[in-house]
Image (spheres, helix red, strand yellow):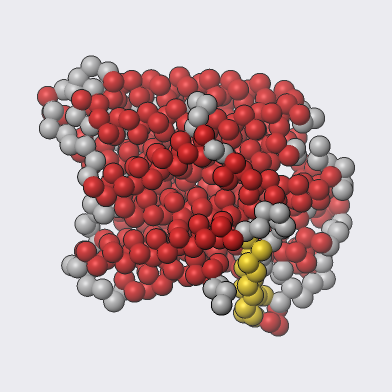
């Protein structure tokens, strides 16, 4: 008997969330156990999918299909390709570690885990959906819970209400969690509207009675439609992917979100945007992708440099990691814009590597903030003396962020820069490499100031290291960075089974190299 693995992966967190509704809020042990069980089932299922995926055959596998609205050609069609396998593994790792890292949460924990599990069910659904309408539905399910998760459990940022515009800061609640939640929601909803317009334009133009992505992708759309529909998809998905200048929701959202939400937010949700640009925009509208690739690449270069320079100027540790994510997502989009095999492999591997790295970063930021009650780097110092474990894992995350050989970040960045050099715009590689050097500056400075500098001051002498469940989260993420850095083929082989097929579609219109 073949189990419907993909359905189980998507349904497990959702079912766990529904079960939590019947558990009394005061029974925290049961709330945590059910949440962890839902995450564990999805992670185990993702590993099993990787085991069953036939890399020799490639293509879409483990297909499942259930009719939803047959009259409109809407079906719950699930299948996975090599890209999907890698991103399922990423999501499974991050949600399992995120639930472990959230065991310290006591304020309305049941409601928190319900929303978190619903969100991650949507993420899993996006990576395996082969029906464009259902893809969009899961995309919205993944995005909308963020408003409540940040608005209720988030923290407010230290924005000084000073200067000639202090009344504006106060009026708009700049730096407040409600402001961050609303800003994120409104910007992403506008992006969703762009996606919806392009999606229905493709459906109508194809004269189709089905939203099946293979069917829509096989249709040769008019070049004019592709030239205006692709930028709509790029803007819509790119807003979630942190594309400049539509990234502004991201640093505030990251900084205000609770630990597990920040981990999912930067580790997985931003990947939905990049995945949408590549899987829907570039693969299904190849002529539009080829025409707009130079602009996409140029803006990606701005992302890399702007994010790195902004991170270097921050004092709040969460904002440093948040702007670092903007920079690293620029590397993903740069790889996509190269239209080369190395660039695309590197882009998807960067999604995987950055997801784990930033998940580890935010887990550590939450750990430090819970104990020190500050995120301001200048106030910290010498924490390695009282938190040696956290210091080691923060250093590992930092080394992966700057692309040290032996970590997952190195492999991804090298592939993207190689792809950029091989592309028709080889100069893209230069600012990309400069961005990596800037990353080394702010990461090493943060590591030195927080953990290895003088101190700690008297108020921090009693800080404790990670608890048992926090250790679990840190070990999972830290070990993954090193294992997939030393043996990148464990994930890269899956990615490379799919890239030639999708890149071949662009080659057929004279775009890929």
At x 22% / y 45%, what residue is drawn? 467
As drawn, the residue found furthest toward the bottom would be 71
From the viewer's perspective, tell me whether residue 434 is left or right of residue 321: right
From the viewer's perspective, tell me whether residue 141 is left or right of residue 128: left
Q: Is residue 110 visible?
A: no
What x and y, as percent, mark residue 459?
13, 28
- Looking at the image, is 229 positioned above or below residue 377? below
- 111 or 121, which is in the foreground? 121
From the viewer's perspective, tell me whether residue 197 is left or right of residue 332: right
Image quarter of residue 448: top left
At x 76% / y 51%, what residue is drawn? 501
- 491 or 457, which is in the foreground? 491
What x and y, as percent, mark residue 469?
27, 50
At x 44% / y 27%, what residue is drawn? 399
Q: Quadrant of the C terminus?
A: top right
At x 41% / y 54%, what residue is drawn? 95
Q: Quadrant of the N terminus?
A: bottom right
Q: Is residue 442 visible?
A: yes
What x and y, as percent, mark residue 266?
46, 45
What x and y, as percent, mark residue 245?
58, 38
- Looking at the image, is 508 positioned above or below residue 209? above
């Amino acid at each position: 008997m073949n189990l419907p693995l993909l359905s189980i992966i998507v349904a497990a967190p959702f079912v766990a969330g529904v079960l939590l509704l019947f558990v009394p809020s005061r029974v925290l042990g049961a709330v945590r156990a059910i949440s962890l069980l839902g995450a564990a089932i999805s992670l185990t299922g993702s590993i099993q999918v990787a085991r069953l995926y036939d890399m020799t055959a490639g293509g879409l596998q483990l297909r499942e299909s259930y009719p939803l609205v047959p009259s409109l050609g809407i079906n719950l069609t699930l299948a996975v390709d090599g890209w999907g396998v890698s991103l399922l593994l990423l999501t499974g790792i991050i949600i399992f570690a995120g639930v472990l890292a959230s065991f310290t949460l006591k304020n309305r924990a049941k409601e928190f885990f319900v929303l978190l599990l619903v969100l991650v069910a949507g993420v899993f659904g996006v990576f395996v959906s082969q029906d464009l309408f259902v893809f969009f539905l899961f995309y919205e399910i993944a995005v909308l819970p963020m408003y409540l998760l940040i608005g209720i459990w988030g923290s407010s940022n230290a924005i000084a209400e000073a200067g000639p515009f202090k009344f504006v800061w106060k009026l708009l609640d700049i730096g407040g969690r409600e402001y961050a939640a609303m800003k994120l929601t409104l910007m992403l909803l506008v992006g969703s509207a762009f996606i919806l317009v392009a999606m229905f334009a493709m459906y109508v133009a194809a004269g189709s009675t089905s939203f099946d992505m293979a069917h829509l992708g096989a249709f040769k759309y008019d070049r004019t439609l592709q030239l205006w529909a692709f930028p709509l998809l790029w803007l819509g998905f790119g807003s979630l992917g942190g594309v400049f200048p539509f990234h502004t929701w991201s640093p505030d959202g990251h900084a205000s979100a609770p630990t597990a939400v920040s981990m999912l937010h930067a580790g997985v949700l931003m990947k939905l945007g990049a995945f949408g640009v590549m899987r829907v925009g570039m693969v299904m509208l190849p002529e539009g992708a080829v025409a707009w690739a130079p602009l996409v690449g140029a803006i990606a270069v701005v992302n890399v440099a702007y994010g790195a320079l902004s991170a270097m100027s921050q004092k709040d540790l969460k904002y440093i990691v948040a702007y670092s994510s903007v920079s690293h997502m620029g590397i993903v989009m740069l790889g996509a814009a190269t239209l080369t095999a190395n660039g695309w492999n590197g882009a998807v591997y960067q999604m995987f590597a950055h997801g784990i790295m930033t998940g580890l970063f935010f887990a550590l930021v939450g750990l430090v903030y819970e104990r020190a009650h500050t995120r301001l780097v200048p106030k910290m110092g010498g924490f390695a003396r009282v938190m040696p474990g956290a210091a080691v894992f923060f250093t590992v995350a930092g080394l992966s962020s700057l692309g040290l050989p032996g970590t997952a970040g190195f492999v991804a960045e090298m592939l993207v820069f190689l792809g950029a050099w091989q592309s028709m715009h080889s100069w893209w590689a230069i600012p990309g490499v400069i961005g990596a050097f800037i990353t080394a500056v702010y990461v090493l400075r943060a590591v030195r100031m927080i953990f290895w500098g003088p101190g700690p001051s008297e108020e921090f002498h009693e800080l404790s290291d990670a608890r048992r469940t926090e250790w679990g989260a840190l070990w999972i993420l830290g070990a993954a960075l090193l294992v997939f850095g030393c043996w990148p083929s464990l994930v890269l082989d899956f990615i490379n089974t799919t890239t030639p097929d999708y890149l071949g579609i662009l080659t057929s219109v004279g775009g890929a190299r």
